[in-house]
Amino acid sequence: MASSTSASDLGPGTALLLLAPLTVLMAAILLYPLGVTVWTSVNNGGFTLSAYADLAQSTLFLKVLRNTFEIAIGGTLMSLVIGYPVAMHLAAQPPTRRTAYLIMVMLPFWTSILVKSFALVAVFGNQGLVNQLLGFLSGGAIKLPMMFNRVGVILGMLNFLLPFMILSILGSLLSLDRRLILAAETMGAGPLRIFWRITLPLSMPGMIAGILINVTLSIGMYITPALLGGRQDMMVANLVDFYTRQTLDWTAASATAVVLLVLSGLLVALLGRVRGAAGLSEAGA
């Protein structure tokens, strides 16, 4: 009889040998470019942190950094406001219908963000479908500037961020013990009181995870602000592009990229702690 070997039966030498090709590949395509970027940011004829000191004193960088967080937080809050009711609706559906609705939620993942950005221009642009409809209904009196400004950036980000928010909250809502709601209804609590005292607190881990995921993805956005934003809506990733293609200042570009990497890493670490805390609370429950 042929015996099967489980992963736990592999010795450390065999495991290292199996992991070696993947490790080499990751080092080649990730660690090496990252190392070059970090080295370029501190090497200007010798080791120096002048690039980071210049960024700390740069009005342009500080303005772009403020823009980045304002846009990221604004888009995240809008995705939370829109995504939470959608997640509640999905959680209330039977499994078969929920699956069909989840496919609709996942549709944005099936299209390139570049294609979606151009599609949004056709829908929300000055001559887009929305403004044409508003002009028809108002006799040309109403025309909303929704593209090539901050509104356009947030609209473009919403299309990308909403599924992450909905899925994060939906996971918490589906793990909610329905007996708590039934007990509250038996005690005479209304829907609003049940939401504030039971549903919202117990879905908080999913909300926080969705917020952190959205902010982490938002601060690294490049295509959306480049295509749908205005000159005043530059984000950190666009600033890296500006340094590399316009001013050819590779040291400043590398330092800016490292700052963006550190910010993203801190948010990812925070997300890991939130998920870990949520897992412990569910295990304790």
Image: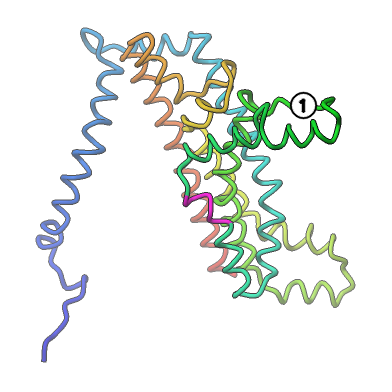
Magenta span includes 228: no
Instruction: Say which amino acid is labelled 1.
Output: Lys
Question: Please, is residue 257 above or below residue 107 in the view?
Answer: above
Residue that carries the numbered disc 1 in the rendered image: 143
Measured from the top left, where is residue 134 in percent x and y? 79, 34
Q: Residue at x 37, y 26 (%)?
A: 258
Looking at the picture, how far across and down is residue 11, in whole percent?
A: 12, 66
Q: With 261 as the anchor, is 198 left or right in this view?
A: right
Residue at 60% across / 74% down in the picture? 95
> In the image, 100: left or right of 20?
right
Image quadrant containing the N terminus: bottom left
Which element carries disc 1, helix, strand or loop?
loop
Side of 134 where 251 appears, left or right = left
Magenta region: which residues? 105-110
Compare residues 204 and 240 and report the one nearer the observer: 240
Residue at 47% from the left image edge and 52% from the top image edge: 110
Q: For this view, does 137 lie left or right of residue 63?
A: right
Q: Position of residue 232 (x, y in %)?
A: 59, 16
Q: Is residue 188 shown above or below 280?
A: below
In this picture, is 259 found above or below 199? above
Residue 243, located in which quarter of the rendered image?
Answer: top left
Q: Is residue 108 magenta?
A: yes
Q: Is residue 119 above or below residue 39?
A: below
Magenta: main secondary structure: helix
- Closest to the observer, 200 or 75: 75
> How is the model colour-coded?
rainbow
State which quadrant residue 88 falls in: bottom right
